[in-house]
Amino acid sequence: MLSYIVRRLLLVIVVVWGAATLAFGLLYLSGDPVNLLLPLDASEEARQEMRHAYGFDQPIYVQYARYLYKLTHGDFGTSLRSEEPALGLVLQRMGPTLLLAGWGLLFAVAFGVPAGVLAAVRKGSFVELITMTFALLGQSVPVFWLGLMLILVFGLKLHWLPISGAGSWKHLVLPVITVGTFVTASIARLTRSGVIQELRSDHVRTARAKGLSGRVVVYKHALRNAAIPVVTIIGLQLGALLSGAVITETIFAWPGIGRFVLIAVSQRDFPVVQTTVVVFALMLAFVNLIVDLTYLWLDPRVRYS
Amino acid sequence: MKRLLRNPAAVAGMLIIGLLLLTAALAPLISPHDPTLQDLALRLKPPGTAGHLLGTDRLGRDVLSRIIYGSRLSLLISISSVLIGMSIGVPLGLVAGYFGGKIDDLLMRLGDIQLSLPFILLVIAIIAALGPSLTNTILTLGVTSWVVYARVVRGSVLSLKELDFVQAARALGAPTRRILLRHLLPNAAGPLIVVATLELARIIVSEAALSFLGLSGVPPEVPSWGQMLADGREVLYFGGWWVATFPGVAISLVVLGINLLGDALGEVLDPRSR
């Protein structure tokens, strides 16, 4: 068990190192960084000076080693625009994004799991047809369009909810639905197939044969085992959830990392973009670790060695 | 194929995709107006205005014609990206699955690293570095999708390579290349087709998202569904609801069609579901 966790932590490090290397490589794909920093008509001396000051005149492996060394010491560089440490800027904007993604996930689990169970238990019924049609639609509608349509209907036509900014719980409603819909649909569909598979299994048949009521069979026997694929899918959907959050933020003017990174991209503020990439990789790697450890708790048959 | 035709979801999916292909192929014939023609006298006319079934945008361009022509761009980008992704992912998956060992570990860890980043963030970062252009959008969407193909092919190869017919081919001295391409690849085709189908939908949505964020590098005069949504967003607040609504319906419909067909293909090609 302990050795498993240690090995998984090592994998987290490998993944984050990979993401950091990718982020480093991207900067070099973008051409001479000095051109980004200085006005086009800057003199050659000014350029040389800048190269020297930032260490761009060193061989690439020296720059790479220096970059990694700094990262391990928590130094993610300085924003080219605001000249503040990039890490602080990124972490500051991470809060609202995690709030949005967290509520989106809660929304998705709260609606997706019951819908999936209902569809599985009532297989072949009208209820299944309705829930699964909605799930299929939910998976097909692009996030950004859903956001615009919600703004149109609930904001501009009905005037029920604010359409941009943050502040009260009302500001959260439309963005959370926007972020959560795709994941709700995925969770509903996977919960359904998981529960259907479990209801066919031997131990459920045995429980039925013992004369247990349908409700006990579904909730105590089938659902617990069906929870394993559902937890996996939640882990896998976190990337989609955060991708969705990036787009949703731009639509609703939500003050999170998605909007921030897009502004950084348009200003070619590479340290900020790099830091965002590394921080996201670190976060998702840890979440996946937690998801894997959740299995241990859910399924006593799983023994990591 | 017969099983597919008996599945109503698959038929619906194929009809939608067929409609998309026809629309793209016949765009000049069926489109009522030139999609790039601006008419400032007819700015932001609502649907139903004479000659403009779905209305006009803020430059007076016909929304329906732009949707019809936009299908071409979506198809161009999604099909080329899927082909690029497959041409990288399939060979890597074959090699990883067949040889196993270090090369397999290396490739799969690379995949893990890539999948540890939210897709849209990765694409935004790459496009920011390369600079937005249509070619870079296609390349980025294509290259970053190698992992799914590699994983699917690797999975199939792992289960196939111990089977008798592969062992027999090897015992007869068939060169590795031949085993990979003639024996393993055709038998891995089923799941690969399913994944490629679903990837088409994902790429169409990703391209639209990039256009929406202003990062796809598609020139503004070229009709693109994502670009139309971005334009429509600006006029949404001034009553121009139709400009963003209809291209979104087009995207959703196409994605729905592909998902329906992909799911049905998955069921038909998966022997366990029979």
Image (tube, coloured by chain):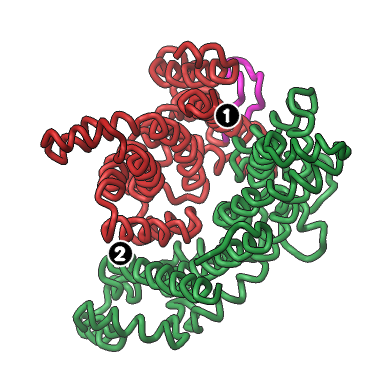
**Label 1 vs label 2, nearer the camera:** 1
- Mark 2 secondary-structure assignment: loop
Residue type at mark 1?
A: Leu
* A61 horizontally vs A95: left or right: left
Observer-nearest of B110 and B33? B110
Residue found 69% across the figure and 45% down from its top = A184
With respect to residue A119, does A109 lie above or below?
below
Gap between marks 1 and 2 measured at Cα: 37 Å
| B48 in magenta | yes
- Mark 1 secondary-structure assignment: helix
* A149 horizontally vs B33: left or right: right
Observer-nearest of A8 and B192? A8
Which residue is label 1 attached to?
A: B256
Residue type at mark 2?
A: Ser
Looking at the rendering, the stretch of residues picked out in magenta corresponds to B43-57
The label shown at residue B54 is none
The label shown at residue A30 is 2
Residue found 80% across the figure and 48% down from its top = A220
Image chain in red: B
Q: Are marks 1 and 2 on the same chain?
A: no
Image chain in green: A
* A104 horizontally vs B37: left or right: right
With respect to residue A20, does B26 lie above or below?
above
Q: Position of residue A59 (x, y in %)?
A: 19, 80
Residue found 23% across the figure and 37% down from its top = B167
| Residue B196 appears in the picture as rendered | yes
